[in-house]
Amino acid sequence: MSAGDFVPASRIVRRPAVPTPVPAPMASAGTGRRPTYLRVVATPSCNHRCSYCHMEGDPRRKGFEGGLPLEVLRAAFEALAPVGLAKIKFVGGEPLLRRDLPELVSAARSIFPAADLSVITAGGVPTSAQEHAFAAGLDRMNVSIHGFGERAFVRRGNRAGLLHARTRFLEALLRRGRPTKLNYVYSGPEEDDDLRALLAFAADRGVLVNVLDDLNADIGPLRLIALLEGWLGRPDECVPDRDPHSLDTTRLRWQAGPWVEIKTEHLGEHAPWRDCATCERRRSCREGIFALRLTHDGHLRPCMDRSDLGYPLVAELERRGVAAASEGLQDWLALRTGSRGVR
């Protein structure tokens, strides 16, 4: 069976009941928690055209189509070194379209030797991109499944030829045995059969599926969990997955069935940034990640929605050099979090 094959829902096994999670209540803003997770927009360029893409809150700017130059990003990593980053993810766009991504991974590995380095890719690239990235020091990959079968893939705005490229990419990645997660954005009932087919494919291979709700639709984690339970029955396991570098998630496992991750915690509930206290978007904020974001034009941001709170890291590097820019970003972090020093 290949990644594009349809699998009947009968392949998915029903199991007995266990409790399901409840989202956390709203917390006081400004917890003093320091971010140790960085998401780097390696390039805004992408060969997919997914209708729900949020571009990390980082729409493409003229003059930055290819992302920041390698040496500029290396200097940015040097400036970020005192922050104590433990997790770095290269995103896009499609990061594997960047020809010097292996050199970028190598630069991050040299400055953050113990960090978890990963990529989010849609997989519509040659399989050789895997080999080069892993050889440079990458730890793992997340593959975004923008429609598992051809009908869903094309409905999301993509060319069918890219689906065949992704199938080859995913099969090669699974043969490597590297840690792999499959991301799937669920937008509504029209995708039920497609998601079921993906779950059966992943269950056969023991691969984790991260089911995400479309941020443009009113779905939410409890509705996603109810949807899965309607198909599969209650999971055999339902446990929180603690992430010291972001927000916790909930993992559900069905014996002889799929292994699923749901983002049951949101940034607005935890409000780690002091600015959350006065943010008019807080109650509707469904961002499931606590991380710094380095945009394709060189700004650090605390979240996807608040570009007005960014720090112009690359401009400061050019104006004042690495040491002074690093001090400035630490002052900016202290202002945003209410805490100074490495977490």
Image (tube, rainbow, N blue to C red):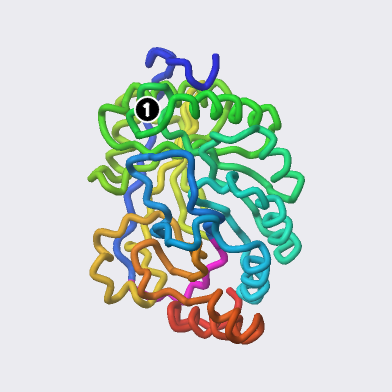
**Quick check: is 36 in the magenta stretch?**
yes
Mark 1 belongs to which amino acid?
Val
**Quick check: is 155 in the magenta stretch?**
no
Count the numbered circles shown.
Answer: 1
Q: Residue furthest front?
A: 63
Residue 244 in sight? no
Residue 224 lies left or right of residue 1; in this view the side is left
**SS for tag 1?**
helix
Q: Residue at x 53, y 35 (%)?
A: 208
Q: Residues within 10 Å of mark 1 (few under 14, many from 20)?
A: some
329 above or below 132? below
Q: Quadrant of residue 330?
A: bottom right
Q: Residue at x 39, y 40 (%)?
A: 49
Q: Residue at x 29, y 34 (%)?
A: 226
Q: Quadrant of residue 224?
A: top left
Which of 278/307 is in front? 307
* Residue 320: x %, y % from top left: 60, 86
Residue 36 lies left or right of residue 222; in this view the side is right
* Residue 24: x %, y % from top left: 34, 57
Q: Quadrant of the C terminus?
A: bottom right
Residue interval drawn in magenta: 28-38
Q: Residue at x 68, y 67 (%)?
A: 71
Q: Which residue is mark 1?
A: 154
Which of 247/170 is in front? 170
